Amino acid sequence: MKVVLRHPKREVEVTGRRRVRDLLKELGLLPGTVLVIRGTELLTTDAIVGEDDEIEVRPVISGGAR
Amino acid sequence: MKCRKCGGAAVLELRRHNTAFCAPDFVEFFRRQVAEAVKRHRMFTREESVLVAVSGGKDSLALWDVLLEGGYKATGLYLDLGIYDYSKESKAKCKAFAAAREAPLLTVSVEEEVGAAIPEVHAATRRPTCSACGLSKRYLTNKAALDHGFAVVATGHNLDDEAATLLGSVLHWQTEPLARQSPSLGSTHPKLVRRVKPLYRLSELETAAYAFLRGIDYIVEECPFAKGATSLLHKEILNRLEEASPGAKHNFLYGFLEKARPAFERVGEVELNECARCGQVTTGTLCGFCKLADQVKRAR
Ligand code: SF4
Ligand SMILES: [Zn+2]
Ligand SMILES: [Zn+2]
């Protein structure tokens, strides 16, 4: 499956079906810090993603003094 | 995962509340949290005009959306910081949002007001970029609110922002910021407009999810100067705590607001004057903004 990551925007290819929770662990991301998006859907950590999916992992943390 | 309310498919798990929601029930939950914040801290009424400081990011646009949907008189204020593509793109997002909802949007150019865009201020004044930027933002939002007669300024600070600020202040025991940190800062001078943070009960994950589910096109890219900010390190530390023990962030912030903050409040200790140049409020003779503008002018 294709996974789009941000900061900077880039794509990685991941093979095999797995739960979102496990995908995030492999990417070294904490579940509370990203939205996992498939098309117009938000996925929870127990959702299963597979070969044909295109997933965006979008960080939710904004920074700097505000 | 199932929605705790209706049993449908959940789109978001809220571990700190030990629950999960489908899209419509999450949107309702989110709006109820904002309503609770507004009510608890008597932030504003539907009769008052609210100036919402919008940056084009998820938090401020989500806030503006909730207020408009809730029937509040909410006008957006966009400060053009002149930070390359980041400012261009974020301004376009704010304009598109306002146009789609036929909501009023004010725009102020920092370059016109300070004499230089934010990226040039550091070279001219040697001040850290974010400190000059933060000072300019506070000053210009207050000034815009005052000039246009708004009752209150609302900003998009969320639970994570507030918890990170709190951690930063505690690590240095900065007693003045601790005394001032609040979801609602009342006016202590006729020229200081009240400031409120209606999203302080909602985490960053929740504001991002709300913006996404509402179809808000916000800027995901960060300001280039945010990189390496200490506040990001503080957020990371808090997120690790949160992962190990859900609710840690909100207990940290709410506990401070309820139990510790009163101990830091020292009412009326600082004397407030009006700036000799611009008439805005300051503790000295010239306000910080006028000093900044002077430094910029001298360097040119
Ligand atoms: S990161 Fe710094 S320079 Fe960028 S908008 Fe925030 S305060 Fe301003
Ligand atoms: Zn539901
Ligand atoms: Zn001044």
Image: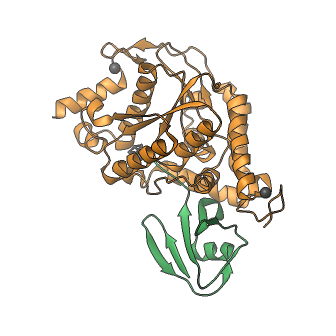
Chain colours: A green, B orange
The quarter of the image holding the N terminus of chain B is bottom right
Residue toward you, B185 or A42: A42
What residue do we see at 34% from left, 43% from top?
Answer: B129
Classify residue B62 by image quadrant: top right
Classify residue A14 by image quadrant: bottom right
Name the spot of residue B2 as percent of width and height, x first: 80, 64
Name the spot of residue A35 as percent of width and height, x first: 60, 62
What residue do we see at 63% from left, 44% from top?
Answer: B159
Name the spot of residue A59 as percent of width and height, x first: 54, 61
In this view, the residue farthest toward the left is B300
Name the spot of residue B20 as percent of width and height, x first: 77, 58
**B39 on left or right of B98:** right
Q: Is residue B169 visible?
A: yes
Q: Is residue B236 above or below residue B198?
A: below
Residue toward you, B287 or B68: B68
**B5 on left or right of B60:** right
